[in-house]
Image: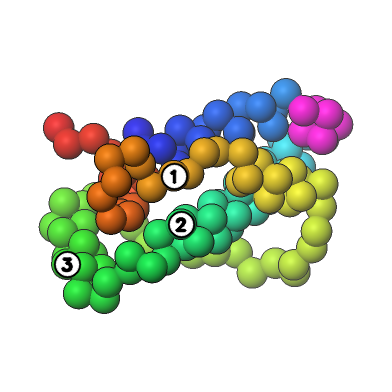
Amino acid sequence: MTVCERAVASEQSAFRKSAIYSRKRNTKTRRAAMEEFTDAMIQRLRVRLYDVFGAAINDAALVAARRHREGRTAGQTKTLVHKKRPARITAATVSGWEAGDRPQIARGVNGKAATASAFLEGPEA
């Protein structure tokens, strides 16, 4: 599990214990609240990752990384179709955005150039 996946899972667990989530009366509304929370958290993490690693983005390396990912996951992935829904700001969305601020994101302690690989790839098997 990557750093980002662990952060999202941890914050989802905390959100399930919150009053915002527990006030939802049925499974459908709880699922919708969790989806809004997760979407907002991921959006915030994307912004933060770009702020930290944006200067290190290299187009050639990005193309190579996409090819590598396609090779590793060939036939194992599917394209998600996002539902079209009106944009709205709910308590779950605000909580997700705030949760995206909590995980520590740093370049590392070894002084090398910033790379996002530790956040985006799991440990090598």
Q: Position of residue 17 (x, y in %)?
A: 72, 23
How far is the residue under mark 1 from the one under mark 3? Answer: 24 Å
Q: Amino acid at mark 1?
A: Ala
Q: Tell me what residue is drawn at x 48 percent, y 44 percent.
A: 105
Q: Earlier in the sequence, mark 2 or mark 3?
A: 2
Q: Amino acid at mark 3?
A: Ala
Mark 3 secondary-structure assignment? helix
Residue sticking out furthest to the bottom:
59
Residue 87 visible in the shown view: yes
Q: Amino acid at mark 2?
A: Val
Q: Position of residue 5 (x, y in %)?
A: 44, 39
Q: Earlier in the sequence, mark 1 or mark 3?
A: 3
Residue, disc 1: 106
Number of residues whose C-alpha sits closer than 10 Å to that of mark 3, classed few (under 14), some (14–19) or many (20 or more): few
Image quadrant where one finds the C terminus = top left
Q: Position of residue 50 (x, y in %)?
A: 47, 62
Q: Of circles 2 and 3, which is in front? A: 2
Residue 70 visible in the shown view: no
Q: Report the side of 56 relative to 82 (left or right).
A: left
Q: Tell me what residue is drawn at x 38 percent, y 47 percent.
A: 107
Give the answer, above or below, for where 56 lies relative to 97: below
Q: Residue 12 occupies which quadrant of the picture?
A: top right
How far is the residue under mark 2 from the one under mark 1? Answer: 7 Å
Q: Report the side of 30 relative to 59 (left or right).
A: right
Q: Tell me what residue is drawn at x 45 percent, y 33 percent.
A: 6
Q: Which label belongs to residue 52?
A: 2
Which range of residues does the magenta coloring cover?
18-24
